[in-house]
Image (cartoon, helix red, strand yellow):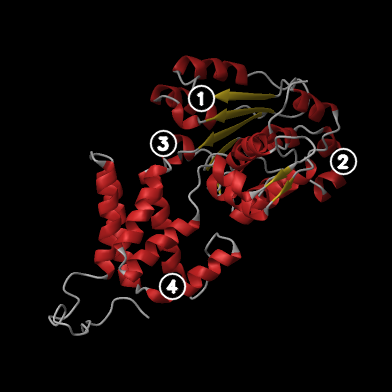
Amino acid sequence: MSYQVIARKYRPKRFADITAQEHITRTIQNSLRLGRVGHGYIFSGLRGVGKTTAARVFAKAVNCSRMIGDPDYLKEITEPCNECESCRDFEEGTSLNISEFDAASNNSVDDIRLLRDNVRYGPQKGRYRVYIIDEVHMLSTAAFNAFLKTLEEPPAHAIFIFATTELHKIPATISSRCQQFNFKRIPLEEIEGQLHSICEAEQIKVDNDALQLIGRKAQGSMRDAQSILDQVIAFAIEQEDDRTIHYEKVAELLNYIDDEQFFEVTDAAAENDPKKMLDVARFVIENGYDEQDFLEKLIEHLRNFLVVYNLRSTRLIERPEQVKERYQRDASRFDSSIIMQMTDLLLQAQKELKFQFEYQFRFELVLLKLIGIVHPVGSLSSTEGEGETPEKKKPLIKN
C-alpha cells in the first residue's frame, strides 16, 4: 500500500477532532439537534485551518443513519457514527450523496449549469445531497450569476457548502443567501499539541522546541504544520531504530535563522557597535539566507520588544521560555519610540530592497542605520577628541 501523508492520515473524522474551531462546530451541531439545517454555507479563513474538513464532517453527519434514526444519539452525541453504511461509503469515497468541486479548475458558466442540472436529482440514501465547492471565489461572474436562482430556491434535499480563502471576492448576492462561518487562525499551542499527538502515534520522539518551530513556520495553518512535519521526519530520521527529532535538524531543514542573530542586531544597536552589526550581515549573506526574510523576522523581533514594553508581560510572545526571559531582560534597554523608529526603517527598507541592486551593500546599510537611530550623530558633546571624557546628551537607551 502506498504511503499516506500525515495531513490525510490524521484528517479529523468527527466535529470533536477539528482543532480550535469550536465556535463553528458547536453551531453546526446545535443546528443538527434542532433540525435547523440551512441550504447554503460559506466557510472562509486561512488555508489549512479546517474549512473543507468541517464541510466533509458536516456532509457525513446529515446523512448518518444513526443520527437520523436514534434521537437520543442525535441529542447527546451529535457526531457521525463512522460505522453505518452511509458513513462507510463516505470514507471509502463511494457515496453519491456528497459531491466535491474545485472551483479553481471548474469555474465556467457551463460547469455551474451542469451542477445546477444535477441538483434536481434527490439522494439515493439518506436525506441530503451535499455539494462542497472549494475555492469558490475563483468562479467567474457569469458562473456566480448562473448559480443565483438555484441558491435562492434550492431543492429541499440540497445543501451547498462554499469554502474560500478570499471572502471579499464572493459577490454580495451570493453571500447574503448563505450562513457565513469564519475559521480562525489556529493558535500555536493547539498546533504543537496536535503535532505532539501525531508524533506519539507514529512513535517518534521530538523536542518541544522543534515542534514550536514547526508551528511558527506554519503560521496558523494546521495542514501546513502537518506537511512540514512530514518533511522533517523524512529529513531527520535516517535509521528506523533512532526515531528522534532534534531542534537543530528542524532549524537546518527549514533554513531557520536562530533568535540569537536578532538579539545580536539589537545588542549591536544598543552598544553602538558597527563591527558586530556587520558581522550579522555577513552571517546572513554567507549562509545564503534571504535578506527580505531576515528583515521580516527582525521586525517580528522588534515587535516582541514592544509587547514586553507595553504589556510588561511575555504572554503574547511565541518563543521558548528562555528566549522570553531574554526579551524581558533586554526590553528595558530601549525606549518604545526608538523601537518604533527602527521598525519604520525596516518596513521601508523591505519595500525598497525589492527594486534595488547591490543587495549586500544596501542590506548592510539598513542594519547600520539602526545604530544611527539609537545613537544619532551629534549626541556627543564638543569636548570629544580634546582628551576629556565626552559628556553625552540624554540617552535614548535606558540603562
Residue where numbered disc 2 is placed: 70
Q: Which of label 4 and label 2 is nearer to you?
A: 4
Q: Amino acid at mark 1?
A: Ala
Mark 3 or mark 2, which is nearer to you?
3
User: Label 3 neighbourhood size at 10 Å, few (<14), some (14-19), many (20+)?
Assistant: few
Circle 2: is it few (<14), some (14-19), or many (20+) Cα within 10 Å?
A: few
Query: Is residue 126 visible to the viewer in this orientation of the structure?
Result: yes
Q: Amino acid at mark 2?
A: Asp
Task: Count all numbered tags in the image, as a single digit.
Answer: 4
On the image, the x and y values in percent for residue 347 come to 31, 53
Tell me which residue sits at (24%, 65%) in the image.
372
Residue placed under numbered mark 1 in the picture = 103
Q: Are marks 2 and 1 in contact (CB under 8 Å)?
A: no
In this picture, residue 283 sits left or right of residue 5:
left
* Element type at mark 3: helix
Residue 81: horizontal and vertical position, in percent? Answer: 83, 38
What residue does disc 4 label?
Answer: 331
Q: Which amino acid does the dot numbered 3 rest on?
A: Lys
| N-terminal label among 3 and 4 | 3
Q: Nearer the viewer, mark 3 or mark 4?
A: 4
Q: Earlier in the sequence, mark 2 or mark 1?
A: 2
Q: Are marks 3 and 2 in contact (CB under 8 Å)?
A: no
